[in-house]
Each structure stands twice: as structure tokens, then as C-alpha cells.
Amino acid sequence: MVEIKIDPADGVPIYRQIVNQIRYSVASGLLEPGDELPTIRAFALRLKVTPNTIVKAYEELESVGIVQKRHGSGTFVSGERTRLADWERRRIIEQRIDTLLTEAHQLDFSVEELFKLIRRRQALMSDGRIDHKANDASGS
């Protein structure tokens, strides 16, 4: 199971933090179709949250097709990985682009300047001068 990190000071509801991190894990391939998620009780104990928090997260994930409950068997990552992963990957990147564009506007950067910076940073990553793994996020 992928490690879920809860930050009570984040301002994002805990169930939403769980949902976001599981969605990211599915989109990035860390969780594969058919992978079983922890039971509600076990997950709640591990994260030190109420079982209702896990129930709410699992219900939301099920409502959008990311997981499916199998009565008597548990909760599993949906088998629709390809379509879901593509959609989820795009959603994650679009959210990050929106944030970047908002911050760039506030800092008075033009789109052209952003593209130059992005190309420069990508070149540094390609050359190994920036560790792209250190910049990975787990589900904002």
C-alpha cells in the first residue's frame, strides 16, 4: 500500500487529503488495478483518524470509479486504469498549471517568460543537475 501522509494543519479536510493521495497514486501507477486498499478499520488506526473519515474517502473514490467495493472482500482499485489514469494525470497537471499561471500573474511573469523558465529547468533535469525525484509531489 502506498504511504498516505495526513497533515492536520494543511487546511484541506483529512478525507480529501486521503482521496487526493489515492487518486495520485492510481494516476501515477503506484497503485495498480486490482490492488486492495486497507480495511476501513485498519486504515483508520494507521492514520489515527475516525473510521467515518475513511468511509467518506472510500465512498468518494468509488463514486468517481477509482475504487470498487466487493462485498465481503474489501475495496480494490478499479480495473479501468488506462482511461482513469489518463484523465487523472491530466487533471493533476491542469491543477498545477492553473496554480503556476496564477502565481506567475501575481509575480508579473509573462507566459513567454514561463515557457523559457520551464525549458531551462527541463534542460537542467535532463542533464541531471536537478533531481526531479526530489520535486515529486504526492497529490495536491
Image (spheres, grey):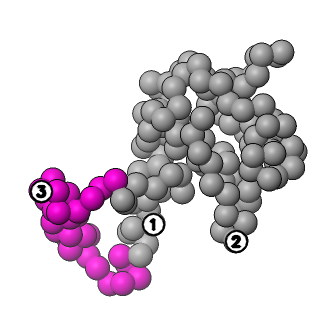
Sequence-first tag of 3 and 2: 2
Residue 94 in sight in this render? no
Local crowd at mark 3 within 10 Å, few (<14), some, or many (≥20)? few
The kind of secondary structure the magenta stretch mainly shows is helix
Residue neighbourhood size for the residue with mark 2, other residues' Cα within 10 Å, grouped as few (<14), some (14–19), many (≥20): few
Question: Which residue is under mark 3?
Answer: 127
- Give the residue displayed 42% in from the left and 43% down from the top: 90
- Asked if 20 appears above or below 96 in the picture, the reply is above
Q: Identify the residue position indicated by label 2 in the image.
A: 9
Q: Quadrant of the C terminus?
A: bottom right
Q: Is residue 92 above or below residue 123?
A: above
State the residue in front, 18 or 98.
Answer: 18
Q: Does the magenta portion include 111?
A: yes
Q: Locate residue 6: give its quadrant.
A: bottom right
Which amino acid lies under the numbered mark 1 shown in the image of this protein?
A: Thr
Q: Is residue 24 magenta?
A: no
Residue 98 x %, y % = 44, 62
Q: Which residue is mark 1?
A: 99
The CA distance from mark 1 to mark 3 is: 26 Å
* Residue at 53% over, 31% down: 31
Amino acid type, callout 2? Ala
Give, as a single range, the part of the protein colored magenta: 104-133
